[in-house]
Image (cartoon, rainbow, N blue to C red):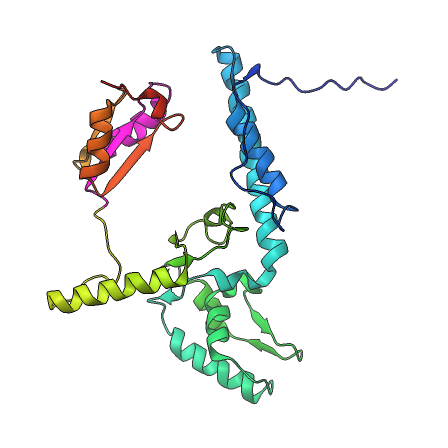
Amino acid sequence: MHDEIHPPILPKYKILRDWSCPWGSTALDEVPPALKNILKEDYSRELEENTSEQQQLWWNHRKTLNQRLRQLLRGIEESWFGSWKCLLLGELLNCKNFESLLEHLVKELRSECKLEVNEGLVRVILGGTRHVCGREKLKCKKDCYIAKQALIELDADKNSKREPIILVLDYELQMLPWENIPILRQLEVYRMPSVSSISALGDTGSRSQKEAGRKCPSFPSIDPLHAFYILNPDGTVPECQNEFEIWFKENNLKGNTGLAPTQKLWASALEKHDLFIYIGHGSDTLLIKYH
């Protein structure tokens, strides 16, 4: 006699409101349905009873959603890019012997493998060695193996950093959380609406540099410490409050902890600071006191 299979116990939810997907039907609807379902489950349900048992079930459910999202993003990276995911990486900075290794590798690919080599492409692939091949060798399409101790040393250079990545995504791609695919998760990633907008900002930065007669960043910059924070306004995330409050105070940031902001404070925080930080449940708009 087989044991009976019982469905898992789920937290008691109440449906708050219908969830409306912020993007329409696209050619990529093979992938977004999974993301839509994750967002819908996260958005449209709330605990009915605020008991310790229900809270634990709620957190277990959130962990399940997080795992589903990780699997989705890992699948996108592997199935869409495979080994070519290294093309998404920024160029290596302060990496020992990189230029000499690149020059030597290009020379051997041309002389030993008899390949027409695109040096720019080799530069990108070499910079992402750990993501495209084993630690000990590269394989050419003519079955020519180039094993180099230098590649292992390059891969082991943990102190090297990378240039930031700027993503220009079209309408059918921008809804996906590209910044969190595994290969980009620990890197500096930005989004811009178009290549022309990047060029415009670059031109603005160059003009400012000439007018100031000194070196300055090519892009408009912000001071991350010229910030205002709203931390745990409804008191529901005390662990987050304990984690961040000390750091905010140590860095002399101005902010509001454990209190719902007034409309005046909200407006002032957005207008007078380079950066606005909100840490708490929801978007905080429902907590604003209009007086």
At x 48%, y 60%, the residue is 88
201 relative position to 5: left or right: left
Q: Quadrant of residue 35?
A: top right
Asked whether 232 falls inside the magenta stretch, the response is yes
23 relative position to 2: left or right: left
Q: Nearer the viewer, residue 76 or 264?
A: 264
Above or below residue 144? Residue 164 is above
Q: Is residue 160 visible?
A: no
Q: How many marks do you count on the picture? A: 0
Q: Nearer the viewer, residue 125 or 262?
A: 262
The residue most toward the left is: 213
At x 56%, y 85%, the residue is 116
Residue 275 on image: x %, y %: 25, 41
Q: Quadrant of residue 135?
A: bottom right
The N terminus lies in which quarter of the figure? top right
Residue 18 on image: x %, y %: 55, 25
Above or below residue 263? Residue 141 is below
Residue 196 on image: x %, y %: 37, 63
Q: Nearer the viewer, residue 184 or 107?
A: 184
Residue 201 on image: x %, y %: 29, 61
The C terminus lies in which quarter of the figure? top left
The residue most toward the right is: 1
- Residue range corresponding to the magenta coloring: 224-248
Above or below residue 212? Residue 110 is below
Q: Is residue 181 visible?
A: yes
Above or below residue 243? Residue 34 is below
At x 54%, y 28%, the residue is 19
Q: Nearer the viewer, residue 210 or 47?
A: 210
Asked whether 147 falls inside the magenta stretch, the response is no
At x 55%, y 89%, the residue is 111
